[in-house]
Image (tube, rainbow, N blue to C red):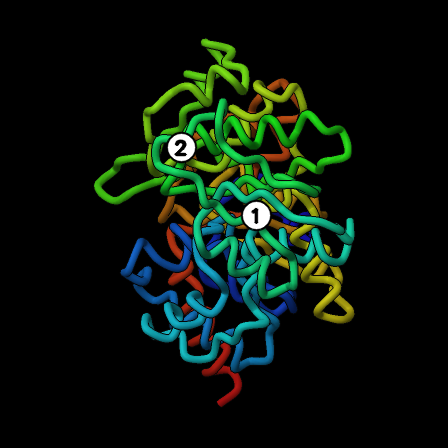
Amino acid sequence: MAGAFGFKGCQKIRGAQIRGLLEAKDFFLFDCDGVIWHGENAITGAAKVVNALIRRGKNVVFVTNNSTRPRENYVNKFTRLGFTDVMLDQIFSSSYCSALYLRDVVKVRGQVFVIGCEGLRMELLEAGIPCVEETDDPDATIYNCALAPDVKAVLVGHDDKLTFLKLAKASCYLRDPECLFLATDNDPWHPLSGGRILPGMMMVVRVLKLDPVTIGSFKLRSTHISSGSLTAALEVASGRKATVIGKPSCFMFECISSQFRGVDPAQCLMVGDRLETDMLFGSNCGLDTMLTLTGVSQIEEAQEYRNSDLTTNHSYVPDYVVDTIADFLPAFEDMEEQND
């Protein structure tokens, strides 16, 4: 569809161009952080855009790699920030999709060892998937801690209470080739307020090449580690590669397609703020993509990818660019005037 409009390839659009896109597409996928809101503040105009799309009969879903909260919490946040028409079945988080993958795809029969926040565990339990309970003494190490029986999967997400003992246990479980190795996402860092970022620890582990026993002997407690960095650490320690559930993997789109009948990739638009996650996700799934400049990536980075000699970099290039999704609002006004 982008080629039909004649400006495919990282071009900023506005006015009539946005209106044509809104009329042509039936399904809109939005990332949340940096697109819909910044922390507890909605992007100006975002609620009006989302509510208008839903009231016009468009299908709207939200795809987020944030695995820290259950979907019910997202519904509450949307309502609190003025998104009055958003329902539970429109939210596809990496934690929810991980639960679907374990229950419906691999049909796991056994316990899951979770490195992640309570929201991730809640989604698994809601799906009927048993999780290993952490009952270790604060002074426990990998030498004297208990290892749970019948662990059939290790699932890694963002963990704000990470210990090296958790990494050591996960590495031990992953020595069993029958134990699945899953990650909610592979984001190497997450943006914070004030221009700060949430870095990971993968460089420490990669440089030191820590094995499970060495990891478990550390007493350092590290907090707020990104899931991508945790996954990289475990990949080094276990010698295995994780199956990624969230963006840019296509599984999240498969979840959407299974719950919404008749989803045609050609009629979808993926709107995000991160080239290496959101735009690549859209490209992998055969969707048109739109970059909004209210988040992580900027148009100069997209242009560098577009001009790159490496064809693989072209998957990071958005079809369209807007300053903010509030740029949709004039198009809605034009459509209303025409209807009047």
Residue in view at x 21 percent, y 41 percent: 194
Name the outermost residue toward the front.
144
| Residue type marked 2 | Thr
Could you tell me residue 154's position as x and y percent? 62, 39
* Camera-side residue of 175 and 225: 175
Residue in view at x 65 percent, y 57 percent: 129
Could you tell me residue 158's position as x and y percent? 45, 42
Name the outermost residue toward the top.
208
Is residue 17 shown to the viewer in this render?
no
Q: Name the side, left or right, on which 196 lies relative to 14.
A: left
Q: Is residue 201 above or below residue 122?
A: above
* Camera-side residue of 299 and 330: 299
Where's the N terminus, which quadrant? bottom right
Q: Name the side, left or right, on which 309 lies relative to 276.
A: right
Mark 2, secondary structure of its residue: loop
Callout 1 crowding tier (Cα within 10 Å): few <14, some 14–19, many ≥20? some
Residue in view at x 48 percent, y 37 percent: 227
Place residue 307 in its image quadrant.
top right
Place residue 26 in its image quadrant.
bottom right
Foreground tag (1 vs 2): 1
Q: Is residue 320 above or below residue 229?
A: below
Q: Is residue 104 above or below residue 152?
A: below
Q: Name the side, left or right, on which 333 lies relative to 57.
A: left
Could you tell me residue 120's position as x and y percent? 51, 53
Disc sitting over residue 132 in the figure: 1
| Residue type marked 1 | Val
Disc sitting over residue 163 in the figure: 2
